[in-house]
Image (cartoon, rainbow, N blue to C red):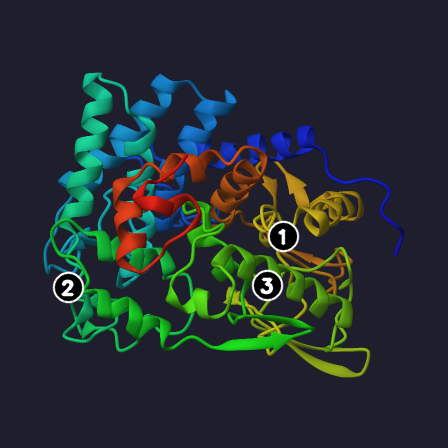
Amino acid sequence: MKPRQQSFSDNQLETLQRLTFDYFLKETNPENGLVPDSTRQGAPCSITATGFALSVYPVGVARGFITRQDAIKRTLTTLRFFFNSRQGREPDATGYKGFYYHFLDMKTGCRTWNCELSTIDSTFLIAGALTAAEYFSRDTADEREIRALAAAIYARADWQWAQNRGVTVTHGWKPESGFIKHRWQGYNEALILYILGLASPTHPLPTKSYAAWTRTYKWKKLYGHEFLYAAPLFIHQLSHMWIDFRGIQDEYMRRKASDYFENSRRATYIQQQYAIRNPRGFKGYGEYIWGLTASDGPGPASKKIEGKLRRFYDYSARGVPNGPDDGTLAPWAVVASLPFAPEIVLPSIQYFDETFPEMTSHYGYKCSFNPTFSTAASKEWISKGYYGLDQGPIILMIENYRSGFLWRLMRRCPYIIDGLRRAGFAGGWLRDGVATV
């Protein structure tokens, strides 16, 4: 492997942001603001991708990728749709109890794919709405409406109902079968879910729900790093897109003399170390090529490669050290760790850019690739689709690295502040009872 002579430059980062931003500009339905889950033909709307769109529009304005007026128009279209959409027990509604179905028809906005009413995906949508409310703060009719709609959408979510008479929060609900049996337990992307649930002005979670969640955490030591364990890299990234966890601690992290930002830094190094060790012997893994997370894959398939039968998966939450791992890596996950460990991320992006130029196309980096899974047409498998779940973190985490824009913005959000405090966070920018920007 050739040594690194340079790191990815700031101009290159902005180019990557700009290309990635085009996913939201060009794939969004202008009639209702819905964003598709992916570029695959017939893909439904993902409410997570739509929440990411609401979050990236302010970045686009700040960077000159879009005018403020166009961003306002897009934001209002989206918020009006969700505020006015049908809430009810009907299986073809858009939502119920203030939460929304994971996947919606791109044209009608009705539930599709027989999917669940998703508490986590609704959280990401609400986080996007609150981002818009903070950014569009001028005293104009349109920007006042954005703030009012965002507040109303947030207030409608019944977090207590989502507990289903338990202490922690369920993953969701289906009209045909009721609540999903799984709950948000163990460290995962639900960090922001509990923070926003605790701060609800209408149906707040009790503080004991957060304590119950943290009691299910697992602290581990891998490759010389002690950290709060979660296998896929995205878990260590998504809540951090909106919340600056540097220097603020809840009771769990105070006991560990750490914080969630430092934890994500360690998780990033662990991912790199796993790739260097490459215990399963996949092609391409190394110091500059790493990143196991939720991503598209070449399966389901089995192939005998160099005398060994390998199993390959389709879309899966890959992770370290125990898998699943089928040789599929996601460049977006490396980029989304940029604020935590730029010293290893920037050289990795540069090496990746030079070594796999075919991974870059009209919306920036493709979702994932697998050097072990070769075909007659290509020496490695490359995902054909772009996914909204990947595109948002690239834009937002590059921006948080470059300017701290989203972090500074959301430090002003009263709901983020209230939720953090109710969860027991203190110190850092929350010190002395005042959020410092």
Q: Quadrant of the N terminus?
A: bottom right
Q: Please give the residue where the numbered disc 2 appears in the rendered image.
A: 160
Quadrant occupied by the C terminus: top left
**Residue 169 visible somewhere in the drawing:** no
Q: Which residue position holds label 1?
A: 334
Please identify, in this view, whether the residue under mark 3 or under mark 1 is nearer the observer. Answer: 3
Residue at the image point whose x is 85% and y is 47% from the top: 4
Q: Is residue 5 above or below residue 212?
A: above
Compare marks 3 and 1 and give the one earlier in the sequence.
3
Query: In front here: 252 or 115?
Result: 252
The percent position of residue 343, horizontal first and vertical second, equals 71, 48
125 vs 226: above or below: above
Q: Mark 1: which amino acid?
A: Val
Taking depth in this image into account, of 63 and 47 the one nearest to the observer is 63
| Spot occupied by residue 140 in the image (x, y as percentages of width and height) | 22, 16
Q: Residue furthest front?
A: 432
Q: Residues within 10 Å of mark 2 (few under 14, many from 20)?
A: many
Above-or-below relation of 231 to 404: below
Q: Inspect the image, locate mark 3, and give the three-letter code of the amino acid beneath it.
A: Ala
| Element carrying mark 2 | loop
- Identify the residue under disc 3: 267
Q: Nearer the viewer, mark 1 or mark 2?
A: 2
Look at the numbered disc 3 and give the secondary structure of its residue. helix
